Structures are given as C-alpha cells and as structure tokens.
Amino acid sequence: MTNNASEHTQSLQCKDRHFLHPWEDVTATGTAARTVIAKGDGIYITDSDGKRMIDGPGGMWCVNVGYGREEIVAAVAAQMRDLSYFSPWSVTAAPAAILAERLAALAPGDLNNVFFTTGGSTAVDSALRFAFFYNNCLGRPEKKHVIARVGAYHGSTYLSASCSGKMLEKANMDMIEDRVHLIPNPNPSRRPAGMSVEDFCDAKVADLENKILELGPDKVAAFIAEPVLASGGVIIPPKGYFERCHALCRKYDVLFIADEVVTAFGRLGSYFASKDVFGVEPDMLTTAKGLTSGYLPLGALFISDRLLAEIKAAGNSAKPFFSGFTYSGHPVAAAAGLANLDIFESDGLLDHARSVAPHFRKRLQELADLPVVCDVRVAGLMGGVECSLDTDQPNEERDMNFLLKVDRICQQNGLLLRPIYATAVMSPPLTISKAQIDEMVDILKHGLQAAAADL
Ligand code: PLP
C-alpha cells in the first residue's frame, strides 16, 4: 500500500516520478505515490510491501489466463533463445505463421487474414486505414467517413482516439473531426424516463441509420463498435442492437468493424463474441489484450476474404497496403500468443468462464441493493458497478472521489479496483473460482458500505 509504505517502496515511488503514466495530469507530475505491484500469481497481485490483492480488473482487462503461467514463460524464453526477431517485410517465422492460422480458424466468418499489430490502438488504427485503402482501391475515394459512438474507447493513436467517445478525455486533445462522427451512447440504463428498452434500441439503431443517410452512404466507409463498451463503463447495448447495426451497414455498403480488444478470448465466454454471442460476422475485427493475456504486447486486425477479393477484382495492378510495424508478428509475442491459446485449450478456460459467469453476475447484482449503487451491468466476466451518492443531483466528480475512497478501502482489504469515473470495473482472470468471486465481491461490498458510512 502507498500509505505507511516501506523505504523500498518509497524509493520506487520516487523513481516512478519519471514515468509519465497514461492519462497523467501533467500539472501534478511527481506527486502521485502509486501502489507498486511486485508480483502476480493466478488472480492475485502482491505489492512491494507484500500486500496481496485480487486483481479485480485483471490488469487492464487483459490477464485472462491469470498471472505466473510457467507455460508462457517457458515458451517466451525458448523463442527468445531460438529467434528473437525477424523482419516481417521480407521473411516470416513459425510463431507468427502458426498463430495467424490458428486465429483465422477461430475467428468468425471469412476473417481469415490476420494483420499483427503492437496492441489494440494500432489494430484499430490499421482497420480504419485499411477501410480508407479499400475504398481508394475500389475507386471511391470520397467514401471515407467513420461513425463511432459516444462512450466508446478505441485507443490512443490520433485516429483511434478520434473514434473514442469518452468526451471528458477529449479536453485539450486534438481530434480528427472532419471524418469521424459520434452517434449517441447506446446505454439502456440512461434511456429517457418512460421509454421501453425495445423503443430505446429502435432509437439507437435509427441514430446509426440517420447518420449514414445524413452523410450519404456513398461517403461512409465504416462503423466501428465494441460489442460491449468496456472502458466506457461496461455498457451493454440492448439485445439485438449489434446485429441490427450490422444489418444496416450491409444495407448501405458500410464496413462493420467489431472492436473486440476486450471482449475476445473468453471475456464473454467465447474466443470472439461477435458471432457466438451477437450473431454477427464483421468485415473486420480488432483484438489485443487477451491474445497474450498481457504477457507481451500484441494486437491483431482480422480482414475478411471478401474485402481482399473485392480489391483484387478491382484491377490488375499491384495494391500494397502500405502499413505495418517493425514488430508486426514479433516472434516472441506470437510465441506468448500460442502458449496462451494452448492454456485456453488445456484448461478448458472457455467452459470454465461460462460456468462461473452466472455466479459472477448474481453476486455483483446483489450490490444493486446498496443505496450508493445506481446501476450494475454484467456481461460474461466483465462487470461494472456504478455509484451515485444522489441520483437526483448528478455530480460525476463527487461520485468519482467516492469510488477512489472505495478503492483505497478495498486495497487495504485485498482487492484492487479500477474505478472508471463513477464505475468500479471488474474483469478478473477467467481462471477465477466461485469462491474467489465471493471473496472479491464481499470485499467490494464492504468497501462500498465502509466508504458510505464515512460520508
Ligand atoms: N479498443 C478497446 C475496446 C479497448 O478497450 C482498448 C484499450 O483498452 C483499445 C482499443 C486500445 O488498446 P491498447 O491500449 O492495447 O492500444
């Protein structure tokens, strides 16, 4: 813990002042004394003073197979010894080739072409660049607009950040505004009073259709959407929404990009949620995180056979997709990805995730009875517990500070939270047992009650 930290921890916190963290308030650099995480084991992490905690958010929604898996450690070490790098431009290597084939077999529909990236943002960026490239190749350079949603998060490159719809996070940051259009948040919990969920779904689908028609279908390249909006606070659009948006995209010849950076690799009980959970075969799909369970950075963009065939049919000249990274298909990251997939198979991890998910849902939903909790949203093994100290007088900053206090109490009691504004996000390793879910939710419940009692 950060209070009463040992000398060793304080010295690390001092050095950490040079580490400019994501989302750092640059007017306050050097003032934060962050918890220093020293070890991970299963669903637990241990800080530099020996305090053991459940990792509620599973790193950053990514430690799907849990910490400390020797199989991945061994595969990575062996691969580094054999071949630490190859240039993906001119040659190939076994781990990336084998991983691409295995992933293509798991991906929905005809998403048989895997473009490896360095993470989720670069996967999203590559998907959008491919959408532009595709339309140029098809001789329709004006078809370049992108539609995304308020509440979504798609990454931290210029293009992917522009498609993100967490509005507070746009302050002082330049965005691409002439090509990227945000339609309203599909959060059914925030639907207008008196409106049914079905009517709300109709309205949100109509938002997409209206935006396509307003811009002109011949101007819209792509719609990008997470099946469940993760960093937006586990927002679960109404039943049928994803499927109907996909149908609209087909109708208007707009590419449908499923951003499964979070929802893939078991988080919703399947390797990919688009088809298995939502019945959709996207034109492109982006993923990262659970692809290596966070052991090494790796992302992937899947492109459908159809798109490549259309480009091929559009003319005889060569059409290189001038996009790629020094680390595309990095052999060590790919080896981690392969070992990660092996664990999914050997541990029956998808079955396990599906079997504990109802308990996770039931236990988290019990928290809705607490007066400080205004909404509980659960999908598979992702959950969001939203707090509001007074729903009649919304005050995001007040509720956010409350949740930071809950986080401090929970850490003392053995649970690391990840408050996103006023929502405590839970996305534990998929290996979690029912007893560990009980332990996690009990600590959270106590944290919420203790923080409320201290108001
Ligand atoms: N897309 C989604 C849905 C995400 O949740 C994230 C990260 O949280 C990203 C893209 C960006 O991924 P990365 O941080 O690996 O670049």
Image: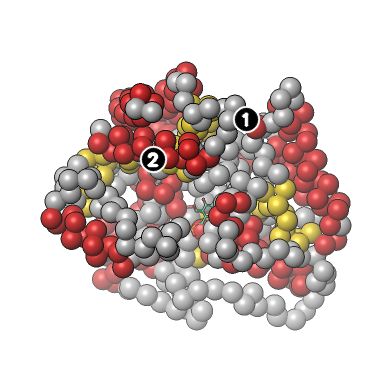
> Residue 215 got which mark?
none
Q: Amino acid at mark 2?
A: Leu
Residue 377 x, y percent position in the rendering: 53, 31
Residue at the image position 72 percent from the left and 29 percent from the top? 192
Is 36 left or right of 454, judged from the image as shown? left
First in sequence: mark 1 vs mark 2: 1
Position of residue 410 relative to residue 62, above or below, is: above
Q: Quadrant of the C terminus?
A: top left
For label 1, the residue is 189
According to the image, label 2 marks what residue?
404
Q: Where on the picture, by quarter, is residue 367?
A: top left
Residue closest to the eye, 108 or 120: 120
Position of 239 with respect to 417 (left or right) is right
Mark 1 element type: helix
Three-letter amino acid code of the residue under disc 1: Ser
- Taking depth in this image into account, of 403 and 368 the one nearest to the observer is 403
Q: How many marks?
A: 2
Instruction: Give the residue at x 31% y 39%.
Output: 408
Residue 39 visible to the viewer: no
Q: Residue pushed farthest left?
A: 7
- Mark 1: C-beta under 8 Å from nearest atom of ligand 1: no
